[in-house]
Image (spheres, rainbow, N blue to C red):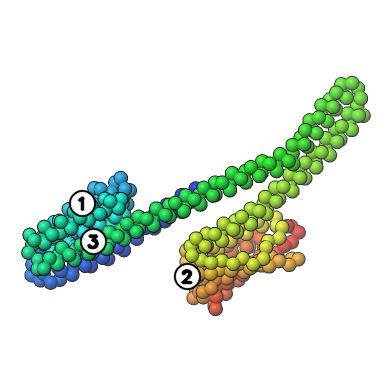
Amino acid sequence: MTSCLSSNNEKSYEQRTAWVYLINLGFYFIPLYFMAGQWLKISIAIGLLVPFIIGYFWAYNSSKEQALKPIGLMFLSAIASSFVTSGAISLFSFCCFFIGFFYSLRTAILSFIGLSILLLVIDISMGYTGYFFTFYGMGICLGVGVFGVIEQNRQRIKRQQQQSKDEVANLATALERERIGRDLHDVMGHHLAAIALKAELADKLIASGKIDQAQQQIHQVSVITRDCLSQIRHTVSGYKHQGLTQTLNTLANTLRDNAIAVSIEGTFPKLSELMESQISLLLTELINNTIKHSQATHCTLCIETSQDWLKLNFIENVPVKTITKGNGLTGIQERVTLLHGTIDYQLIPHYKVSIKLPLSESVR
């Protein structure tokens, strides 16, 4: 689920920034600047951008199976505009990028050959000097098409890496379930067998009128039950502590995945369930803030413990001008307050968040 949400968020971000690449249409307008007075041609050239841009956003949000129609619309717009402006080369280059991105290398090469022939035909029919339209267009379209192929391979490798991470996570989950099942079997198996045996024995003793002996067996059942419960609590406590450690490791890997190095100094002591859950959440919010808003390339988390206090220092290797307390920092403050702790911020020379939490008997 997490990887799915991450993938959806990333796709949403790419869709929101699709317009940025339209800046390259600036090359389309350069020839129009030198067509002063040819208002009809200029109007036609600008008007043809409407179906082209529609096709562009359509293709940008399409899958491979859906990409043919929007690319075709872009291609027809480019052909039509080539009869009024040489800037149509810019439109053809967009088409080549999507062809390189969506289709196989063989299809991309065949499409490039076909486009080269088309450029030559347009060049001859328009009477351009020195075949500049053909050769310049071929060079631009080839270069941009190669970028499309490279982007396709990058996305494929990224999907494979994400799939590998998901498989590792699923395997780790399966192993953890097996470990929990094995631990519970080891803890409870012989205890439950002993309880069943002694309960049957007590039942038989009661039936035969040996009440005192039956009471002894029932007392032993009570002792075994308390011992079993104690061992279960101990086992679950071990899971809780590992849960905080696992959360910290996951957050560290998230930073590294976003090209931010991380160092962790110190370890957590044994904590109450409340402290573990709240510390996990506030660390998650701290690191999410770093990923979203910071320019840091390295972070350090220092964990210091004394008899009465737990201190957390989260340090980035960049300064911060000002702090805007949005939902993230507000949530951190609320969690620190819940644990009766304090939080301080340092902006220079490095951004530092210092959290101090009491280790009173009530929260251990």
Q: Position of residue 160 (x, y in %)?
A: 44, 51
Q: Earlier in the sequence, mark 2 or mark 3?
A: 3
Local secondary structure at mark 2: loop
Which numbered marker is on residue 73? Answer: 1
Residue 164 located left or right of residue 243: left
**Mark 1 vs 3: CB contact within 8 A:** no
Residue 65 shows up from this direction? yes
Q: Callout 3: 10 Å neighbours few (<14), some, many (20+)?
A: many
**Mark 2 vs 1: CB contact within 8 A:** no
- The residue type indicated by label 1 comes to Leu
Q: Which residue is disc 3 drawn over?
A: 141
Residue 83 vs residue 339, the one in the foreground: 83
- Residue 250, by quadrant, is bottom right
Quadrant assignment for the C terminus: bottom right
Q: Which residue is disc 2 drawn over?
A: 295
- Residue 341, by quadrant, is bottom right
Residue 294 located left or right of residue 216: left
- The residue type indicated by label 2 comes to Gln
Q: Position of residue 187 (x, y in %)?
A: 74, 41
Of all residues shown, which one is farthest toward the bottom? 349
